Image (cartoon, rainbow, N blue to C red):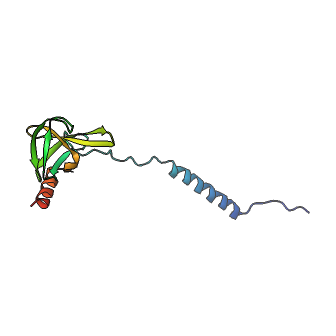
């Protein structure tokens, strides 16, 4: 005797629930991602400044050079603790490596070896460093 195949109410509801969950999953996973606000750079971006930072002379004194070179003409000198605006940096190849020079905005404008000063992001930091280190 063959028994007729019949589905019970419980089996249908399990299939229906599975199907409903599957449809909900598809619906919610296809939602567009939340649009984020655009990122605006700060007004004083490092890339848009016309200077690198402010330096404080750390050597007893140093000569301001006309060109970034040891053999360059001296335009004057600066003493330890002097605050200068650094407007450009240049690395020059020498026999055993590189030497970094900085162009400073002084009167007269000239070049210093970078290792004779500490460079800070802004004038306030440089003034504070100068006052603390060289009193």
Q: Quadrant of residue 103?
A: top left
Q: Residue at x 57, y 52 (%)?
A: 23
Foreground residue among 73 and 49: 73
Q: Where is residue 106 drawn, in percent x and y? A: 10, 41
Work out whether residue 132 or residue 64 is closer to the camera in this orientation and state it.
64
Is residue 10 placed above or below 61 in the rendered structure? below
Q: Quadrant of residue 45 in the image?
A: top left
- Place residue 98 in its image quadrant: top left
Q: Residue furthest right?
A: 1
Q: Position of residue 130 (x, y in %)?
A: 13, 56
Residue 66: x and y, percent?
Answer: 15, 35
Of residue 9 and residue 33, the one placed in the foreground of this image is 33
Please give the count of numbered marks on the rendered protein: 0
Please indicate, yes or no, whether residue 95 appears anywhere in the rendered image.
yes
Judged left or right of residue 43, residue 22 is: right
What residue appears at the point 52 percent right and 51 percent down from the top-left corner?
A: 29
Residue 121 at least partly seen: no
Between residue 19 and residue 44, name the one nearer to us.
44
Figure quadrant of the C terminus: bottom left
Spot occupied by residue 88 in the image (x, y as percentages of width and height): 21, 39
What is the residue that sits farthest to the bottom in this orientation?
10
Q: Which residue is found at the position 27% from the left and 44% from the top?
A: 41
Quadrant of the rendering where the N terminus is positioned:
bottom right
């Amino acid at each position: 005797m063959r028994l007729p195949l019949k589905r019970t109410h419980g089996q249908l509801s399990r299939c229906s629930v599975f199907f409903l969950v599957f449809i909900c999953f598809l619906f919610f996973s296809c939602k567009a991602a939340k649009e984020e606000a655009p990122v605006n750079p700060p007004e004083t971006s490092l890339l848009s400044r016309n200077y690198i930072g402010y330096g404080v002379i750390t050597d007893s004194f140093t000569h301001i050079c006309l060109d970034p070179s040891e053999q360059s003409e001296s335009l004057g000198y600066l003493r330890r603790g002097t605050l200068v605006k650094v407007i450009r940096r240049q690395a020059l190849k020498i026999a055993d490596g590189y030497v970094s020079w900085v162009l400073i905005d002084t009167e007269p404008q000239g070049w210093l070896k970078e290792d004779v000063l500490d460079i800070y992001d802004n004038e306030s930091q440089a003034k504070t460093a100068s006052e603390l280190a060289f009193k």
